Amino acid sequence: MGKNQVFSREKLNIFKIVGMTALVFTGQTCLNLLWQYLGLSTSDSNALDIVNQLNSENFWVMALSVVLFAPVLEEFLYRGILLEKTAQYFPKHPQMVILFSAILFAFFHTWSFSVAFLGHFITGAYLGYLYMCNRRMTDTILAHSFYNASILFLQILFGMVQIGG
């Protein structure tokens, strides 16, 4: 890595991406459990709306939206446009660019600066870091989809979401 290069240009393979995403997901799950233990609410109105829609007759449409459509759209918006354009204006400050993108990602997921904001911020920062390493949106879309699918799987497993309403 060069003197001014902050992120390795090593191309991350699918196993590293899935592994890193699993670590971020596991870390966030542990944080959520800690916050719940401390009596802090980790839910936000956006997440509750999604769970309600998943528990309706629209399950399959919502599941596809959560696992496929939202990651593609959000990665195009937050990494492909916002992060990339911001990086053009601040090429020597990639950490600041990632933080800015992560703050907006978190805020537009929660519409508040609540405890839930921190979880989305961590995810946004990780996805920004992943994008800056490879500059490939396919990597961030894959990670984002895997992350959302993992949440959906746990929600089904623990009975928060019933397939088919």
Image (tube, rainbow, N blue to C red):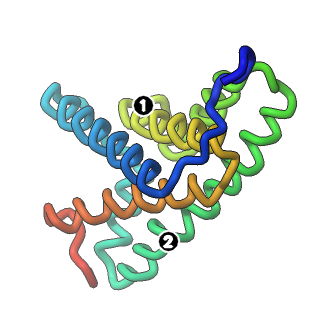
Nearest the eye: 30 or 137: 137
Residue type beneath disc 1 = Leu
Image coordinates of residue 56 in percent, x first then y, are 32, 78
Q: Specify the quadrant that holds the C terminus.
A: bottom left
Based on the displayed image, in which of its 4 quarters is residue 92 positioned?
Answer: top right
Residue for point 51% across, 60% down: 142
In the image, residue 44 above or below residue 148: above
Marks 2 and 1 sit apart, C-alpha to C-alpha, by 23 Å
Residue type beneath disc 2 = Ser
Residue for point 71% across, 21% down: 2
Location of mark 2 (residue): 65
Location of mark 1 (residue): 118
Q: Left or right: where does residue 110 sit relative to residue 96?
A: left
Based on the displayed image, in which of its 4 quarters is residue 15 positioned?
Answer: bottom left
Nearest the eye: 102 or 62: 102
Image coordinates of residue 33 in percent, x first then y, are 18, 37
Q: Specify the quadrant that holds the N terminus.
A: top right
Choose the circle earlier in sequence order: 2 or 1: 2
Nearest the eye: 17 or 149: 17
Q: Left or right: where does residue 143 sit relative to residue 41?
A: right
The crowding category of the residue bearing disc 2, from other C-alpha atoms within 10 Å (few below 14, some 14 to 19, many at least 20), is some
Residue for point 48% across, 54% down: 143
**Mark 2 vs 1: CB contact within 8 A:** no
Residue for point 34% across, 85% down: 57
